[in-house]
Amino acid sequence: MKDLFSIKNKVAVITGASGVLGCSLAKSFIEAGAKVVALGRNQETLDARVKELTDLGGDALAVEANVMDIESLEAASLKIKEKYGSIDILLNIAGGNIPSATLSPEQSFFDMDMKGWAEVTDLNINGTVYPSYVFGKVMAEQGSGNIINISSMAVYSAITRVAGYSAAKSAITNFTQWLASDMALKFGDKIRVNAVAPGFFIGDQNRAILLNPDGSLTERSKKVMAKTPMQRFGEVEELNGVVQFLCSDAASFITGALIPVDGGFSAFSGV
């Protein structure tokens, strides 16, 4: 019997593969038998990541590219097709918030560093749109493929201090729906585009906001816990299963969806 959840031998391009989430997904996909292309801006870091993946017995390739540069991505696409012949999966993991776009608790919108605003919106919108444009074209030509984008809890309700990041992730949710529709209507039902909205996970970008130096919860974290029925932060590995599911035949009639992985945060009113 065919394994509906299998992604074995699928060629998966992962942007932001050097980060915590990208690394976790890359290892998960290797363990599931996929061929992983780690995409990022630092060849040395990528080579180290790929060594970790090949040490697990997997087939992996490091390709240096900038998600903000279409020519760079097109060159990467040629390298990938030359080695593997196809691109079956694109995981748009590159992105995240930046310090210059984060307001302090005492600041208002009018204290926003607009250069920071431009940087964070550009990274999180075009850093997903450009790879989708380049690698999605390959999928359109071959008539099959899966694109997974990363959204945020900020699309469900306003989260203070991160206006630019919130606006960008809301745009990505809409773009996911738009691209899913366009791909299905013009290139068939074998190309699907979905998004995952992680809840609160401790990572390098948000550690200082969510945890005090002694490891205790900050005031912001206490508010997060008050609205999270599971009463804990997520573990990064807990995103792997839903992403693999969306890339498999088990999700063959799912496109344009936004799936929260959040311990109930988006479902709970806090009352």
Image (spheres, rainbow, N blue to C red):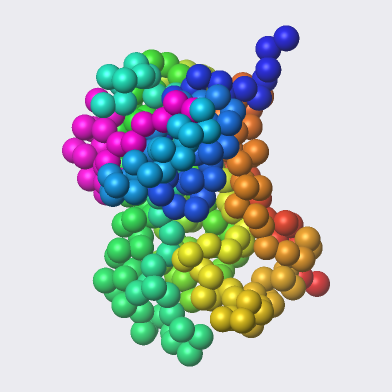
- On the image, the x and y values in percent for residue 112 come to 36, 79
Residue extending farthest front = 55
Relative to the observer, which residue lies in front, 49 or 71? 49
In the image, residue 162 above or below residue 252: below
Magenta segment includes 62: yes
Relative to the observer, which residue lies in front, 177 or 87? 87
In the image, residue 67 above or below residue 224: above
- The residue positioned 34% from the left and 56% from the top of the image is 123
- The residue positioned 46% from the left and 19% from the top of the image is 144
- On the image, the x and y values in percent for residue 186 come to 41, 22
Confirm whether residue 6 shows in the render: yes
- The residue positioned 29% from the left and 74% from the top of the image is 114
- The residue positioned 74% from the left and 57% from the top of the image is 264
Magenta segment includes 79: no
* In this picture, residue 178 sits left or right of residue 119: right
| Tag count | 0
Q: Which part of the image, by quadrant, shows the N terminus?
A: top right
Quadrant of the rendered structure where residue 113 is? bottom left
Residue stretch rendered in magenta on the structure: 58-78
